């Protein structure tokens, strides 16, 4: 009779959940990277626009254009703050995803360890039973040769 690891269904479910957590973590990392790139682009754009503003101010600006530049810079600053908040939120989600992945990996490792111990115990029992059978055959053989 072949003995089956009775926790195998849970081990398979644990592996499946680890795969799902791995995919989710990949998506979270990608989202964080995209949010960071958007922030970098906004900061770069703001710096370039500020340079244009300073160059225009050095040449002389009428009050309306000055106000337009200032208002636009304020809008870019608001967008940068929103982008920073999005990056921070994405980092928190990624950290939570990493913890989830780590927890799932720990469960998989625990089931793998239990399965390995189970297989080792089965192998030991089979070897012991085989040795017992060999010993019995040898004892019968020796018993038969003594009576001859």
Image (tube, rainbow, N blue to C red):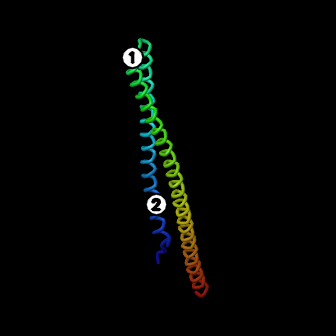
Residue closest to the eye, 89 or 3: 89
x and y, in percent, of residue 22 in the image: 45, 52
x and y, in percent, of residue 127 in the image: 56, 71
Residue closest to the eye, 22 or 9: 22
Reply above or below: 36 against 44.
below
Q: Quadrant of residue 142?
A: bottom right
Residue drawn at 38 percent across, 21 percent down: 64
Residue drawn at 42 percent across, 20 percent down: 53
Reply above or below: 134 against 37.
below
Residue closest to the eye, 111 or 133: 111
Question: Do residues under tags 1 and 2 come within 8 Å of each other at their CB atoms?
Answer: no
Q: Secondary structure at mark 1?
A: loop
Q: Quadrant of residue 13?
A: bottom left
x and y, in percent, of residue 15 in the image: 46, 60
Residue drawn at 48 percent across, 73 percent down: 4
| Apparent side of residue 109 relative to residue 54 in the rendered image (left or right) | right
| Apparent side of residue 102 relative to residue 65 in the rendered image (left or right) | right
Reply above or below: 134 against 79.
below
Reply above or below: 70 against 93.
above
Q: CA distance from mark 1 to mark 2?
A: 67 Å
Residue closest to the eye, 62 or 118: 62
The circle on residue 62 is 1
The circle on residue 33 is none
Residue furthest to the front: 63
Residue furthest to the bottom: 147
Q: Secondary structure at mark 2?
A: helix
Q: Nearer the viewer, mark 1 or mark 2?
A: 1
The quarter of the rendered structure image containing the C terminus is: bottom right
* Residue density around tag 2, few if under 14, some if 14–19, many if 20 or more, within 10 Å: some
* Residue density around tag 1, few if under 14, some if 14–19, many if 20 or more, within 10 Å: few
Residue furthest to the top: 59
Q: Which residue in the protein does label 2 denote? A: 15
């Amino acid at each position: 009779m072949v003995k089956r690891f009775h926790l195998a269904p849970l081990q398979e479910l644990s592996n499946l959940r680890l795969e799902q957590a791995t995919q989710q973590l990949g998506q979270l990392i990608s989202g964080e990277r995209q949010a960071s790139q958007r922030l970098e682009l906004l900061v770069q754009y703001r710096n370039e626009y500020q340079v244009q503003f300073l160059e225009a101010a050095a040449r002389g600006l009428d009050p309306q254009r000055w106000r337009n530049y200032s208002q636009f810079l304020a809008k870019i600053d608001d967008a940068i703050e929103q982008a920073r908040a999005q990056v921070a939120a994405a980092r928190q989600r990624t950290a939570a995803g990493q913890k989830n992945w780590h927890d799932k990996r720990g469960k998989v490792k625990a089931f793998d360890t239990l399965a390995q111990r189970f297989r080792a115990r089965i192998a030991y029992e089979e070897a012991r039973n085989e040795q017992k059978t060999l010993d019995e055959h040898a004892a019968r053989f020796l018993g038969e040769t003594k009576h001859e």
